[in-house]
Image (cartoon, rainbow, N blue to C red):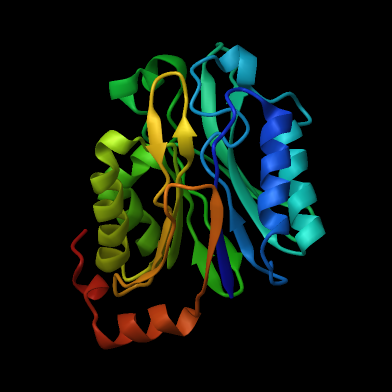
Amino acid sequence: MQLIACQYDIQWENREANYDTIRSLLSSITVEPGALIVLPEMFTSGFSMKVSRISEAVPSSAESSLAEIAVQHKAWALGGLVFESEGGKGSNELSVFNPEGQRVGHYQKNHCFSYSGESNHYESGEDILLFDWHGFTVCPTICYDLRFPELYRRAVRAGADLFPVIANWPDLRIDHWNTLLKARAIENQAFVIGVNRVGQDPKWKYPGSSAIYDPHGNELARASADACCITADVFLETATEWREEFRALGDMKE
């Protein structure tokens, strides 16, 4: 099955411009029916702390866009968005839609990035999301979550074998991004698709470097610093057979 990572220069707090960019990018590639299309963290706005400005209404424009993408391409669509809580803080989330345009789940970022002040504006989540995609058990995570391997172990114990990681990861720490994506794939014997953005916002520059890794840590696809979609065909047997042959996960301690 086909994985698709879409990275682009997220126009600052400009929904319609970002929707247009996504449509254009997807129209430039062949999207196979049933593919999983993955968009970055806060895909409509960029990594903004202005919760009241960028948060979704109910019904959500960003979720409607994800549903539209899913139905148009007969694919699954996943992307990051923001909701506002009753207390005024934000919830940095992602939503997933199936080819029928139905939401199959949402996830709240478990680890807010205190170094950037995110934790002053957003509340962290506690739960993980698991959903089935053509036999894969998928567990999506968001940006700073990548630095916390215990979150991925928790998901692996629950059966996860594919991890989308959506992000706004700046150029200053891009080597960490590349290293940790590969590490999460190797240590969990799982597929990992990391989707970053390019361009810059008022504070940071972003170098893209979206990537797809297999359970051996082999790089299946890598993006440059340009707006683009990268794709890779993945097979569940790659994960299941490697886990059967090399039973490292069976040696985990509680």
Q: How far across and down, in percent of the image, does residue 217 sit?
A: 29, 70
Vertical arrangement, residue 199 with respect to residue 26, above or below = above
Q: How far across and down, in percent of the image, does residue 152 sit?
A: 34, 54
Q: How far across and down, in percent of the image, does residue 160 sit?
A: 43, 64
Q: Residue at x 38, y 26 (%)?
A: 204
Q: Residue at x 29, y 43 (%)?
A: 174
Q: Residue at x 35, y 17 (%)?
A: 117
Q: Quadrant of residue 186?
A: bottom left
Vertical arrangement, residue 195 with respect to residue 52, above or below = below
Number of numbered labels in the structure image: 0
Quarter the N terminus occupies: bottom right
Q: Quadrant of residue 214?
A: bottom left
Seen from the viewer's position, the closer of residues 155 and 189 is 189
Residue 252 seen by the camera:
yes
Q: How far across and down, in percent of the image, does residue 195 sit?
A: 47, 50
Give the left or right position of residue 239, taking residue 93 as reference: left
Give the left or right position of residue 20, taking residue 228 as reference: right
Seen from the viewer's position, the closer of residues 171 and 157 is 171
Vertical arrangement, residue 159 with respect to residue 128, above or below = below
Give the left or right position of residue 93, taking residue 160 as reference: right
